[in-house]
Amino acid sequence: MDLEQSFEALLQRPILSKLPEFQRNERLKHVIFAQQFDRDLLDHLCQVASMIRTISRNRPGQDFLTGLLSHRRAMLYFTQPSTRTFLSFMAACQILGIVCNEIRDPTLSSEYKGESPLDSMRMFSSYFDAIIMRSNVAQFAECSAYLMNELDARQQRSVPIINAGSGADEHPTQALLDIYTIQRSFEFSSPKDTLRNSRFDQLRSKYPSLTLGLSNKVYGFCGDVGRGRTVRSLSTLLSLWENVTIYFIAPDYPKLAPRQDMLDRLREAGVRVHRARALRDVIGELDVLYMTRIQHEHNTDADREFFETFDQSKYILTSELLPEMREYCAIMHPFPRNQEIPPEIDLDPRAMYFRQARNGMWIRAALLAHVFDADGRIVTYHQKNYGLTRQDA
Ligand code: CP
């Protein structure tokens, strides 16, 4: 794909200089990089996601939500396999009334006859109001956003591009759902809480330094952290919080180890970054454990040779390790999983990964509402029907 040729000069720039082009006034126009989100926007999206969750619990609320964007259409262009991202975006569209269509196999489109992917994008923009895309080609989403910006500058039809995973690059909306899941995990609210006794109070008696929220936490990313785009996007967002420590628990093999540019960027942002060679060595220190699978689909012949003798056991969360973990440590995984989290761990109350996947639906609905300027109406409806939230007060 000759994407670099089309937009070479634009692609070469430092990421921060690109961000204003993906904004429209105070709103995201395209969603391409995790760096587009600041703390205010993340807090707002998490708040709107929780409001959508509450509103959708009853029929009048569902009717309100499905009426919000029923005049909009979205194209789900997923040419790389996906279960969660595809389905949660589809469900998010359905929650908001957005009609969506899909292309998952480009050989069933005119790309089979030689149409260029960028021509395809322009065609989609003729019929749809947003393009949500996953591709194994790094920077394809970014190039598609530049194409839309060029059309916009010529006052031609242009629609938002939402990156649902691009090559080994970025997975910004996965990072959103991860942040939302961590935020919910560290609210420590439980139906059993009373004014005199809450789960948070109980935990604080054992862990005096424990705080609510994402600050003051120790995060561990374990497994194939070098090739995991979710690790890159989430660690970028975590650096927005105060007093964050990250352990990258990965073998020294260069493909699996954290990339130097990511480590430098995190340190520059004030994150304390450490390396660990085995999960067991640090598991007791973690507030959040983010497991990842080994991404064998990216292996070269040399990688395959390395994996013939590779011992993965140091990067597997076994039942024997569970007692060593903090009582409240959130176990996360973007999924799909292989053997790094055996199914018996699913019964542990700290296992968050299925909730994490469901949270993807709520936060992606919040993101779409933001892009289409419908989030204000969700806040108003929520305030009218459920009163002020803690953040509104
Ligand atoms: N986490 C994630 O991106 O899952 P899918 O590949 O199934 O979309």
Image: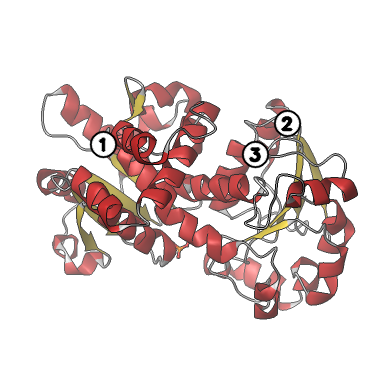
Q: Secondary structure at mark 1?
A: loop
Q: CA distance from mark 2 to mark 3?
A: 9 Å
- Would you name the residue on which mark 2 appears? 267
Q: Residue at x 69, y 66 (%)?
A: 349
- Would you name the residue on which mark 1 appears? 372
Residue 320 falls left or right of residue 219: right
Q: Is residue 138 among what the camera can see?
A: no
Q: CA distance from mark 2 to mark 1?
A: 35 Å
Q: CA distance from mark 3 to mark 1?
A: 32 Å
Residue 146 falls left or right of residue 258: left
Verify CB contact (< 8 Å) between mark 2 and mark 3: no
Query: Quick one: 36 or 329, which is closer to the camera?
Result: 329
* Mark 2 residue crowding within 10 angstroms, few (<14) / some (14–19) / many (20+): few
Q: Is residue 98 among what the camera can see?
A: yes
- Would you name the residue on which mark 3 appears? 262
Single out the mark in the foreground, 2 or 1.
1
